[in-house]
Image (cartoon, grey):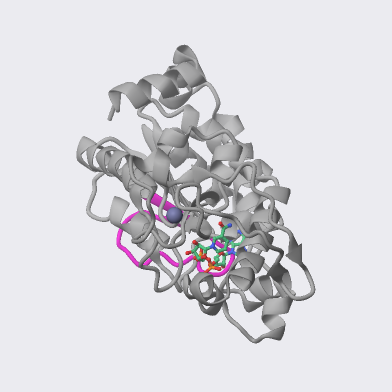
Amino acid sequence: MSKPVSNKTLAQIARVIHGSSALVITAGAGLGVDSGLPDFRGPQGFHAAYPPIAKLGLSFPDVSTPRWFAQDPAFAWGFFGHRLGLYRAASPHAGYGILLEWARRRPDGFFVFTSNVDGHFRRAGFLQERIMERHGDINFLQCADPARCSGRGDVDELIWPADDLEVEVDEGTFRASRPLPACRHCGGLARPNVLMFDDYQWLEDRTAAQDERYRAFASRLRRSGKPFAVIEVGAGESVPTVRWESERLVDGTRGGTLIRINPRDHGVPIAGDHHEVPLGGLEALTALERHMEGLAGTGRGEDVGQARGDLEGEARALRDDVI
Ligand SMILES: NC(=O)c1ccc[n+]([C@@H]2O[C@H](COP(=O)([O-])OP(=O)(O)OC[C@H]3O[C@@H](n4cnc5c(N)ncnc54)[C@H](O)[C@@H]3O)[C@@H](O)[C@H]2O)c1
Ligand SMILES: [Zn+2]
């Protein structure tokens, strides 16, 4: 059970968001839980979503490794094919839409930083150029053996969308039927363009391009001295990449406030006026939205965002990188 949060605290957080010139949304697997997706460290989440893997007694790091693509590709694609199917079948919950509205109204723009590989921010309408996917995206493919692959060229050549890909998985054995997904260059095996454990074959070019845009935005934000908010949802402690990024963004700045939404791991260990929200993502965002509605029309974010028109403002923010 989540702990209750007082209306006074929610109103205070809503004022922080409303008064922010820019927003960074950071997210881990917990954000997808309210869309019906499993997280990973919760052993229930992972094993409940992948019963054949539970039967084999394997953990997430045991399965999410490129080793299987070399040793047993039908099993590797059984896991990733099933996972791709789960993410495609789920729809991003209403909290994404709430975040997008808040983000679009910030006069100095926004960015998403996530370790999720489900592509749900894009599906919820966030502009691709404003998303940093630290661990890649399962909706994209690459060669499983890039060192030997004949594929060359730019990022769009080497990493391609999995839109037309259908992987047939035997749900009892968790093995994928042949033919398995093939590399479009050399005809060998393809794999998802996600960072796995002990992964030396991951092609990071797509993520590197996102990272360049994100770093430029984040450093301008930190230097600007203007108030900005970092809203973190569902980032776990075992692979703390997202949590550390949220803390790094606000630590030592004059303007940054961290809002950490997480029913269990909500502690913020750094100094400053930051906020811990011990609720699930959808519940917290819906409650905050009610308080934001009460503030509508009275703050700079609303005025500037409305005057520009949401999409127009976003496009301009992109072009000018306005911070
Ligand atoms: N949807 C995805 O794309 C997805 C899903 C699972 C794992 N992964 C990958 O696995 C790794 C998992 O690390 P992680 O830290 O993201 O996940 P994690 O499983 O380690 O942690 C999930 C966190 O979400 C919190 N949580 C649970 N229910 C929640 C809810 N309803 N609302 C908000 N928060 C909730 C938990 O308390 C926990 O802190 C990442 O590296 C990621 O690449 C991706
Ligand atoms: Zn290849």
Residue 68 percent coordinates (x, y): 53, 74
Residue 299 percent coordinates (x, y): 45, 25
Predominant SS along the magenta part: loop
Residue 98 percent coordinates (x, y): 60, 37
Q: Is residue 120 magenta?
A: no
* Residue 20 visible in image: no
Choose between 242 and 165: the one closer to the eye: 165
Choose between 205 and 165: the one closer to the eye: 165
Residue 48, image quadrant: bottom right
**Horizontal arrangement in the rendering, residue 66 relative to residue 293 (left or right):** left
Instruction: Point out the residue furthest to the bottom here.
Output: 57
Q: Is residue 259 magenta?
A: yes
Residue 256 percent coordinates (x, y): 32, 46
Residue at the image point whose x is 47% and y is 70% from the top: 66
Instruction: Point out the residue furthest to the right here.
Output: 172
Q: Is residue 133 above or below residue 180?
A: above
Residue 43, image quadrant: bottom right
- Give ligand 2's quarter of the image: bottom left
Indicate the quadrant containing the C terminus: top left, top right, bottom left or bottom right. Answer: top left
**Horizontal arrangement in the rendering, residue 14 relative to residue 224 (left or right):** right
Q: Which residues are magenta?
A: 257-275
In this figure, what is the number of numbered marks?
0
